[in-house]
Structure formats: structure tokens, C-alpha cells
């Protein structure tokens, strides 16, 4: 049975395999699988699409856009889209828990985050293999644009494999200075994961991913996809 734990250093992208996590430095995420949280969401959710402990996903229309009422300044609106997946998934943001059950393939949450570091995590657990996806997007009030802050997927379709995790790690090299959307105002750092036992040595039953959002204190000036952003972080 294969069990691997990966530690990613942004820029260097070094990996450490085996049964234990180690490493030092500000850009290393040491991840150890913990039991899944309870099957419930808890946190402070923002905007007209949220009520109580849940939110609806935006459909792109102005009336129901998840960015409505977003603060203008150092505090910024984020969408956390979990799935699509048929499995239970948990995303943590600081002390908040965002839970996607099995009733829907996809769930969304809208939160406001201030400038500085915010720790995030994704937890998946399912016998026979897991399918896990999460998308984090920043909303720009000045541009009315959503930025592709962070994307992670393993499985969905199919089940997550060690090879797919390795491909995700290799793909991080294309992001300059950890800026996944050059028109946005967030850096992603300290990415790592721990994958649990894989009965077939290929597809783990458990996965825990960790990363940190470094939210800058300025607002984006260009809409997502503007070609002038391409060389912004050379």
C-alpha cells in the first residue's frame, strides 16, 4: 500500500515522500491528515446569495451576482466553489468550515477576507477513491470581474490518483511568484497535501490539501483576462 505526503515549496517545487512531513521555512506546508470535520458549515457568509449557514451559487446575472454588496477596500469578497463531486467535501478558511454534502454536486460560499494571510484547506475521504475539486475566486469591485485566485482538482471525473497529484504539482511552475491570476491581487503560497492509504497503490481514499492566500491591500485595476496583466509579475 502506498501512502505519500507531499510538501511543495513555491518556486522550488520540491517534494518529500514517505510517511512523515518535514521542512522549514515560510513557504513550506507540512500537512498531516486529520479526521474530517462534522457534516456542517460554520462561518460568516456575505452577500445576497447567502442565508444562515449556506449560499447559492451565482448565475452571472447582476441581480444575483455573488459580488453584490462587496466591500470596497482592503476587505474583499471571495467565492469558494466546492465540486462538482458526488462525495462529501470540506473546505476550511481560517476558522470557518464550508461543507458540501451529497445532495448537490456543487456548492458555493461567499466570504469577505481582509488583507494578509488566510489559511485554507480541502478535506476529502471516501472508500474506493475520492473526487475533489475547489475553486477560489476574488471579486474586484472596481472592475466587476471575478479572478481565478486558486484552482485545485483531483478526480471528478473519475477518482483522484497519485499521478494526477504529481501533475498538479508540476503545473504550479507556470505561476510567477505564486500569482495564479495576474490581474488579481492575491498570492497563493505554502501549498501541500497528505494523501492516505491507497488500497490499489494508485488511488488514495483520503486527501488533505493546505494552502495560504496572501490577500494584498490594493484593489485589482484590470478585469480578469486583460492581456496587459501578462507580464505584471516578471
Image (cartoon, grey):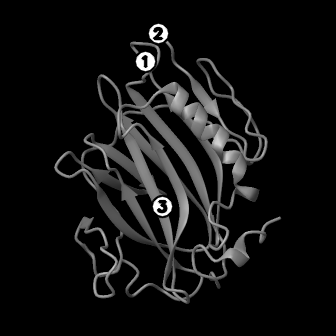
Percent coordinates x, y for residue 82 in the rendering = 36, 54
The answer to which of marks 3 and 1 sits earlier in the sequence is: 3
Q: Are marks 3 and 1 in contact (CB under 8 Å)?
A: no
Q: Residue furthest front?
A: 227
> For numbered disc 1, what is the local secondary structure?
loop
Q: Which residue is mark 1?
A: 198
Out of 156 and 190, give the one closest to the viewer: 156
Q: Is residue 166 left or right of residue 37?
A: right
Image-quadrant location for residue 62 = bottom left
In the image, what residue occupies the spot 36% across and 47% down? 90
Q: Is residue 230 left or right of residue 120?
A: right
> For numbered disc 2, what is the local secondary structure?
loop
Q: Which residue is mark 3?
A: 136
Out of 215 and 134, give the one closest to the viewer: 134
Check residue 1 in the rendering and tell me which mark sits there, or answer none.
2
In the image, what residue occupies the spot 30% across and 74% down? 59
Amino acid at each position: 500500500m502506498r501512502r505519500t505526503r507531499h510538501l511543495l515549496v513555491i518556486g522550488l517545487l520540491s517534494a518529500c515522500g514517505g510517511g512523515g512531513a518535514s521542512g522549514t521555512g515560510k513557504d513550506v506546508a507540512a500537512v498531516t491528515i486529520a479526521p474530517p470535520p462534522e457534516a456542517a458549515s460554520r462561518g460568516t457568509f456575505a452577500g445576497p446569495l447567502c442565508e444562515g449557514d449556506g449560499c447559492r451559487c451565482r448565475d452571472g446575472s447582476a441581480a444575483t451576482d455573488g459580488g453584490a454588496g462587496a466591500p470596497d477596500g482592503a476587505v474583499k469578497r471571495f467565492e469558494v466553489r466546492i465540486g462538482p463531486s458526488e462525495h462529501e467535501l470540506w473546505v476550511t478558511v481560517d476558522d470557518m468550515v464550508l461543507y458540501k454534502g451529497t445532495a448537490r454536486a456543487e456548492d458555493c460560499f461567499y466570504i469577505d477576507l481582509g488583507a494578509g494571510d488566510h489559511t485554507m484547506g480541502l478535506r476529502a475521504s471516501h472508500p474506493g477513491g475520492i473526487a475533489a475539486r475547489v475553486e477560489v475566486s476574488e471579486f474586484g469591485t472596481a472592475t466587476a470581474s471575478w479572478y481565478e485566485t486558486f484552482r485545485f482538482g483531483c478526480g471528478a471525473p473519475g477518482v483522484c490518483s497519485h499521478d494526477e497529484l504529481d501533475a498538479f504539482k508540476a503545473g504550479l511552475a507556470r505561476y510567477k511568484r505564486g500569482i495564479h491570476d495576474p490581474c488579481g491581487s492575491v498570492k497563493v503560497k505554502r501549498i501541500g497535501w497528505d494523501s492516505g492509504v491507497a488500497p490499489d497503490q494508485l488511488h488514495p481514499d483520503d486527501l488533505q490539501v493546505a494552502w495560504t492566500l496572501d490577500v494584498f491591500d490594493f484593489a485589482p485595476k484590470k478585469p480578469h483576462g486583460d492581456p496587459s496583466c501578462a507580464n505584471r509579475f516578471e
